[in-house]
Amino acid sequence: MTCTRVRGYVAADRAACLALFDGNTPTFFAAGERADFAVFLDAHAASSAFQVVERGWVIVACGGHRVTADGETAGFCWGMVDRAQHRTGLGRILTHARLAAARATPGVRQVRLDTSQHTQGFYARFGFVVERVVPDGYAPGLDRVDMLLRWPA
């Protein structure tokens, strides 16, 4: 059995995370978003509780969250799984890790995310509800779906 572990992102993970992005383009990300993701990795990953998932010492998923100015909302950012390993449980592992990190953040009571029509059903299984859909919001044929998960008081 191959060991799977979640750990914090380090700068040496940059190329592997960009490769994950490339493997999920254009179905899950618009090609034009790559530069934004690279800037995020270089400038914001450390402040965004960004995590990687390793399977057998290979990075197979990544994602994080940032707390918004209200101090009560965590926003998921840049979550992705190696395209060849979709539907193997890695997305569930990553999402549980991101939710646990958000819940451990003092004051956070809810998580927001934006995703595409291709993954909104996945997040719905965790209790996220659709707040808004923007047709072609990322690129032609790639809708933006805004979702929210509130924790019970």
Image: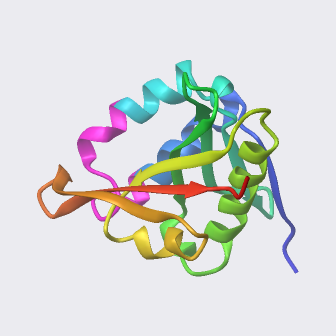
Q: Based on the displayed image, in which of its 4 quarters is residue 69 positioned?
A: top right
Give 62 or 134, whichever is nearer the viewer. 134
Q: In the image shown, does 100 or 26 lie closer to the viewer?
A: 100
Q: Is residue 153 above or below residue 121?
A: above
The magenta stretch is 22-35
Q: Position of residue 7 (x, y in %)?
A: 81, 45
Question: Residue at the front extreme?
Answer: 153
Q: Residue at x 37, y 31 (%)?
A: 36
Q: Is 30 included in the stretch rendered in magenta?
A: yes
Indicate the position of residue 39 as horizontal and vertical percent values. 44, 24
Direction left: furthest residue: 140
Instruction: Tell me the residue at 66%/38% (across/down).
Output: 50
How many marks do you count on the picture? Answer: 0
Q: Quadrant of residue 132?
A: bottom left
Residue 103 image point, x, y percent: 76, 47
Residue placed at 22% from the left, 60% from the top?
A: 142
Left of 150 or right of it: where is 52? right
